Amino acid sequence: MSNRHKVFVSYHHALDESYKRIFELRFGNVFEAIVSGSVQDGDIDPSLPAETIRQKIRDEYLRDTSVTVVLIGAQTWQRKHVDWEIGSSIRDTKLNPRSGLLGILLPTYYESHTSVECGKYNPRTVPPRLYDNIRCEFASIYNWSENGATVQSRIHEAYNRKSTKQPDNSRASFGKNRTGDEWTD
């Protein structure tokens, strides 16, 4: 089997667009494809039932992707669309099997969380649903890397994990964006 995977990138659009572009430019040639069709404000009616929202995201935005990469900056954990994309990507639907999942801590994460030692992270400042899946070993989290082989290897590991570990999608979906310095249960 090839180590090339169709990757969906989830990120905070307002704050981390530049890193998403760098990720696409630097690593796009090592993947089968990078899907840039992230959910934007107004794309999906937030008053729809959570199950309908997840189904629409999985079948319309994440169609045929095999791994979701979450770029984690200063406020990524607060974004409802990131939560929805993670929740949708780890679902099996009639049209699409679940995707592998991994998080990448951006340099901006450490710039905004100065009390966190580089190479480590505060679990309450990464997306909660991602953290749930790190805890159950369905997902992993890494620091930003400029090395294409390293990034490709991590994505391939996420792809392989999706068939050996069960994801945790039990957390209620965000109804709106969050605020504050960190999340609480």
Image (spheres, helix red, strand yellow):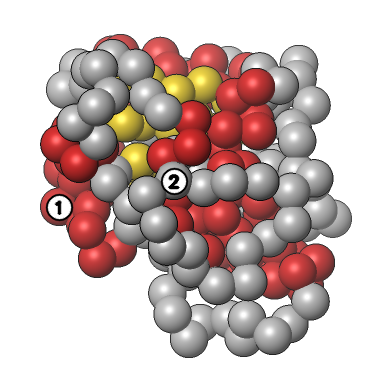
In the figure, residue 114 lies in which quadrant?
A: top left
Q: Residue at x 20, y 41 (%)?
A: 112
The amino acid marked with disc number 2 is: Glu
- Left or right of 113: which side holds 86? right
Give the image location of residue 50, x and y in percent.
75, 69
Gap in angstroms between the C-alphas marked 1 and 2 = 23 Å
The residue where tag 1 is placed is 18
Q: Closer to the N terminus: mark 1 or mark 2?
A: 1
Out of 86 and 182, give the one closest to the viewer: 182
State the SS at label 2: loop
On screen, residue 107 above or below 70: above
Q: Residue at x 80, y 45 (%)?
A: 170
In the figure, residue 113 lies in which quadrant?
A: top left
| Image quadrant occupied by the N terminus | top right
- Left or right of 72: which side holds 15? left
Q: Residue at x 52, y 21 (%)?
A: 140
Density class for disc 2 (Cα within 10 Å; few <14, some 14-19, many ≥20) is: some
The residue where tag 2 is placed is 182
